[in-house]
Amino acid sequence: MKKALILTMVVILVAGLFAGCAAPAAPAAPAETNQEGAKKVGLVISTLNNPFFVTLKEGAEAKAKELGMDLVVLDSQNDPAKEMANVEDLITKSVAVILINPTDSDAVGNAVKAANSKNIPVITLDRGANAGDVVAHIASDNVAGGKMAGEFIIKQLEGKGKVVELEGIAGTSAARDRGKGFNEAIQGAGIEVVAKQTADFDRTKGLSVMENILQAQPEINAVFAHNDEMALGALQAIKASGRSIMVVGFDATDDAVKAVESGEMAATVAQQPAMIGSLGVENAAKVIKGESIEKSIPVDLKLVTK
């Protein structure tokens, strides 16, 4: 009897030990932890062959480091197909939020929709998306910046003159809005746009396009370029021609600001690309935490003159 009792107690004790060694139940917090701890954010840049977007990237990286977030940066090289591939890559990496600076506001729609289909929130930077759902758009008021440039040119030319407009990549919201603001500003003034041509936000194209325009137009008083890279290219062509023409750019890149300070360029509209990148990461962090953010987040502009 005693042996039976002892054997029973041993069996109970051993069973208890095995139960204690079993894997503990999964904590109730994993889903919450995933939401709170999902700190990987993707940043798709239209091109890193442009100082403006390099600065935007650096602003995003600095904020990500400050917040302890993992930022994956991919360069689309101004190619919508590459942009789509980059977004698909980020989707496979299971990033929590995708920040995207579109190559083209129309073409980026499919990339945004791809992220939407996987319930990955998208925030656009500098350029908007014409399709798909984005939780926020962070950019300068490009229409206001275009008006700022137009009003400056009107003042410098005392209300009349012949102007060239170098346009950015067709289809981008930045090119459309800067052109809109500029043309609204000069409407009704004695300013004639004698040539309007795209140079794709590129310095080399700005140079070649301006060379052709200089040959075709004997009288030009000013040039407004939708970004500083084109403005600097145009400036190079103007200097080579020996003509004196006022040049106004947009972005306030380091090279453009130096050109303004030296008197070679008349002005540039200053955006704050580092702030755009920083605000992108900051708002991505809020989205990850489930906080609400504004649909449109503006970044201030100012005119830089000598």
Image (spheres, rainbow, N blue to C red):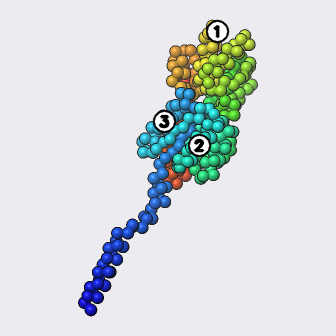
Q: Residue at x 59, y 23 (%)?
A: 229
> Which numbered circle lies on residue 59?
3
Instruction: Confirm or deny contact between disc 2 and disc 1 (CB under 8 A).
Output: no
Q: Amino acid at mark 3?
A: Gly
Quarter-wise, where is residue 2 in the image?
Answer: bottom left
Q: Amino acid at mark 1?
A: Ser
Q: Is residue 49 above or below residue 236?
A: below
Mark 3 surroundings within 10 Å by alpha-carbon count, few (fewer than 14), some (14 through 19), many (20 or more): many
Q: CA distance from mark 3 to mark 2?
A: 20 Å
Q: Position of residue 133 (x, y in %)?
A: 64, 48
Q: Residue at x 46, y 42 (%)?
A: 64
| Residue where numbered disc 1 is placed | 241
Q: Is residue 104 above or below residue 252?
A: below
Q: Earlier in the sequence, mark 1 or mark 3?
A: 3
> Which numbered circle lies on residue 87?
2
Q: Amino acid at mark 2?
A: Val
Foreground pick, 208 / 59: 208
Q: Position of residue 79 (x, y in %)?
A: 63, 33
